[in-house]
Image (spheres, rainbow, N blue to C red):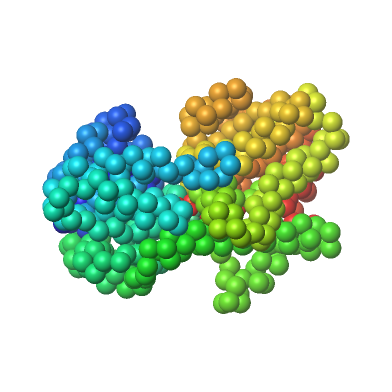
Amino acid sequence: MNIGVIGGAGYVGLVTGLGFAELGHHVTSVDVNEERIKRLQSGQTPIHEEGLLPVLERNLGDGNIEFSTSFPDAVEGQDVVFIAVGTPAQDDGQADLSQVIEVAERLVDLMESYTVVVIKSTVPVGTVELVQSILNREKAEGMDFDIVSNPEFLREGKGMIDFFYPDRIVVGTRSERAREAMHELYRPLIAGNIAETTGRAPLPADIAPEERPVPLVETDLASAQMIKYASNAFLATRISFINEIARLCEEVDANINEVARGMGYDPRIGSSYLDAGLGFGGPCLEKDLKALIKIAEANDYEPRLLREVLGRNDQQVREVIGKVKELTGYLLYKKIVAVWGLAFKSGTNDVRNSLAFRVVEALEREGAEVQAHDPMALDEARALHPNIHYFDDPYEAAANADAVVLATDWPQYAELDFDEVKRRMARPAIVDGRNLLDRDMLMTEGFRYLSMGRA
Ligand code: UGA
C-alpha cells in the first residue's frame, strides 16, 4: 500500500513510517522540521532508538521510504494517511489540537481518491469526530474517505521493538472498508509472521522478542481513544501507588524492593511498573493523565483518583529534596549538589518533562549550586536549560559536592568507582532517587545514603 505519514520526523511518526516501510509498504514521511528531514534523507537519525538505524538505512536504500518537507507528498496518491503530529499539553493540561486541526484542513483538498485517514496522535475523545467534520465540511464532490483511530503504545527507546512486536493493535472505526485496510496494513504483525512475509527479521536477534500472533482490538472510535488514555493513566497509577507504599515502607522500616518483589509474583498484579523512585516523567504519562482529567472535567465528572495519582507524583520531587536536606543539614544555600541523570528515563536522550529538571529547579530555588551530568542527553539538556553547569564526566560533576542526587536510572551509575566519587566530593552523601545503587556497599564505603522506600 502507499502510505503517507504527517509528522513523519517526530518520534511516533518516524517509528511508524519506518515500521510500515520494513513491512514492504511504500511510505512517504513528511515533516515541517527541515533539519530533521535532511538528516533522515542522508540516513542519520535524530532520535536514539534501539534497532532504528539499520531499518532506516535498509529502507532508504530499497526506496521503501522517502522523506519530504512538502505536505502534499504525504497525501496525494496515498491509500492511507497517518496523522502523527504533536498534541502538547497547554498550561491548563488540555491537549493542544491546533496541529491536528491544521492538518485536517490542509488534507482535504489534496486527497485524490478513497483515503483512509488514521489518527495516530493521542487526542481527546471527540477529536476524531472533529477531524471527520472538518473533512466532511471541506471535501470536494465525490471524494471519499474514512477515519480510523489507531493509538500507539510505543515506549521511548524501545519504539521499534514495540512497533514490530506489540502487545495489541487497536483500531477504532465505523467503516468496514477502513477496517479491512488496517487489517491488510498490519497483517504480518497480527499473524506474527513478519520474517516469513518480508523474508527478513526486522530487528537483530539480540533485541527482537519471539514472533507471536498479536491481538487486534477492533472497536468504536471513542473506545479506541479511551484505551490509550486509560492505559497510560493506569501505568501512572501503578507508579504513584508504589511510591505511596514506598513512603509507608520508610515509616515502618520495610524495604520497597522486597515488597514489590513479593507483590509481583501474583499474576493478577505482575511485576512491571512497580519501581519506586522520583516518579513518572517524560512527554507522555503526565501529559495524558492531565488530558484525561480535563476530559473528565469537560464531562462534568470529578476524577478524584486521577488527581491523586498526579498529586502523588508531584510529591516525589519534594521527597527527594527533603532527603537532600536531611543529608546536608537543611540549609541548601551555597551548597553544591551534583545531579546524575537528566534524561526522563535511561536509554533515551529525551529530556522533555524530565523530573530531573524539577529537582534541579527546586535545588536552585533554595540557593544550591547544581552540577549536572548525563551519559547521553547533555546536548538536549543544554538546549532546553542553558543555565546549568554541565559536566561530561560523573566524577567531575560530583567534585566538591555536598550531595549527589541520582535522578535517572542509567545502569552505568551503579558501575562507578565510589572510592573515587568519595574522594572528589566535599562530603560523601547520596540521595538515590531511583533505588539503583548498592546501599550496603555505599554505607560500608562511608557514604551517607538515602533512597526511596528502603529503610
Ligand atoms: C509511555 C508508555 O509506557 C507507552 O506505552 C506509551 O506508548 C508512551 O508513554 C506514549 O504515550 O507515547 P514512555 O513515555 O516512553 O512510554 O515512558 P515509560 O517507559 O512508560 O516511563 C515513564 C516514566 O515512568 C519514566 O520517567 C520512568 O522512569 C518512570 N517509571 C516507570 C517509574 O518511575 N517506575 C516504573 O516502575 C516505571
User: Looking at the rendering, which quadrant does residue 327 occupy?
Assistant: top right
* Observer-nearest of 341 and 289: 289
**Number of numbered callouts drawn:** 0
Q: Is residue 285 visible?
A: no
Residue for point 55% across, 23% down: 386
Q: Nearer the viewer, residue 376 or 426?
A: 376
State the quadrant of the C terminus.
Answer: bottom right
Which image quarter: residue 175?
bottom left
The image position of residue 30, as x and y in percent, is 26, 39
Residue 384 visible? The answer is: yes
Q: Position of residue 49 (x, y in %)?
A: 39, 46
Residue nearest the viewer, comparing 351 with 82 = 82
Rendered position, 440 above or below 327: below
Instruction: Judge by depth and name the residue closer to the eye, 408 or 235.
Output: 235
- Position of residue 249 in the picture relative to residue 286 (left or right): right
Residue drawn at x 31%, y 53% as measured from the top left: 132
